[in-house]
């Protein structure tokens, strides 16, 4: 039996109404509410339906997809050009992923230097102090491997912040490359670390169909 849902739920507004399709038949269901419906095509057949927004969402870019946990908002420049998506978590930290597609190691190293320099310029322009740049080190998240570093600094209000930068690529013949920039308060690092690790660890090439 095949089924699917279609709707654009609001995470903060009123309950959304979903259209649930089962074996070619459609039913309307309110989000987060269980309802018993009767088939009009199969006499005597009933379904107990309930839909909700999954706490884990899938974000598809051009050559990769990955999962991230709610609550968060996503800004995606899906109009064309170099694909960039930024996830802003309710706690205030951000993860920005840029999808470069296939890229050799030499070019990935150049991208890492460029992304690092842009971050340093932005941080310096924001009147940060005590800026410290860590060394480039090997990084592995799931099946993605590459290099990365950590920049620490105090913002204009004197609050310590971290900026983690990585450039990763697929292993075992998976042809994709991406940069990931996570920015967060140092006080939140114990909560942010596992969230970012899980998101980057879930990266897969888009040719593989994600789990439902």
Image: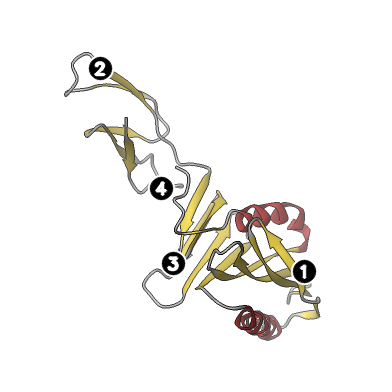
Q: Image height check: is 41 above or below 11?
A: above
Of the residues under marks 2 and 4, which one precedes in the sequence? 4
Along the line of sight, the residue nearer the viewer: 31 or 107: 107
Mark 2 Cα-neighbour bin, 10 Å: few <14, some 14–19, many ≥20: few
Of the residues under marks 1 and 2, which one precedes in the sequence? 2
Say whether residue 173 is left or right of residue 5.
right
Residue 62: assigned label: 3
Say whether residue 157 is left or right of residue 51.
right
Say whether residue 153 is left or right of residue 61.
right
Residue at screen point 77% across, 76% down: 136
Q: How is the image coloured?
A: secondary structure
Q: Quadrant of residue 80?
A: bottom left
Along the line of sight, the residue nearer the viewer: 4 or 107: 107
Task: Specify whether residue 91 is in view.
Answer: no
- Marks 3 and 1, how far apart at CA: 36 Å
Residue where numbered disc 2 is placed: 45
Q: Image height check: is 157 above or below 90?
A: below
Of the residues under marks 3 and 1, which one precedes in the sequence? 3
Mark 1 Cα-neighbour bin, 10 Å: few <14, some 14–19, many ≥20: few
- Marks 3 and 4, how far apart at CA: 25 Å
Q: Quadrant of residue 180?
A: bottom right
Residue at screen point 60% across, 61% down: 172
């Amino acid at each position: 039996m095949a089924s699917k849902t279609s709707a654009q739920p609001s995470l903060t507004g009123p309950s959304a109404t979903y259209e649930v399709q089962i074996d070619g038949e459609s039913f309307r269901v309110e989000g987060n509410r269980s309802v018993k419906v009767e088939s009009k095509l199969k006499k005597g057949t009933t379904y107990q339906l309930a839909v909700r927004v999954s706490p884990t969402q899938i974000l598809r870019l051009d050559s990769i997809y990955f999962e991230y946990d709610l609550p968060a908002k996503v800004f995606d420049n899906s109009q064309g050009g170099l694909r960039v998506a930024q996830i802003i978590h309710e706690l205030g930290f951000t993860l920005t992923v840029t999808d470069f597609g296939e890229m050799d190691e030499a070019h990935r190293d150049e991208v890492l230097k460029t992304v690092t320099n842009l971050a340093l310029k932005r941080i310096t322009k924001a009147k940060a102090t005590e800026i410290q740049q860590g060394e480039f080190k090997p990084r592995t998240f799931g099946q993605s491997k590459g290099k990365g570093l950590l920049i620490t600094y105090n913002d204009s209000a004197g609050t310590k912040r971290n900026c983690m930068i990585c450039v990763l690529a697929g292993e075992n013949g998976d042809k994709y490359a991406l940069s990931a920039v996570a920015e967060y308060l140092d006080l939140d690092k114990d909560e942010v670390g596992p969230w970012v690790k899980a998101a980057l660890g879930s990266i897969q090439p888009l040719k593989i169909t994600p789990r439902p």
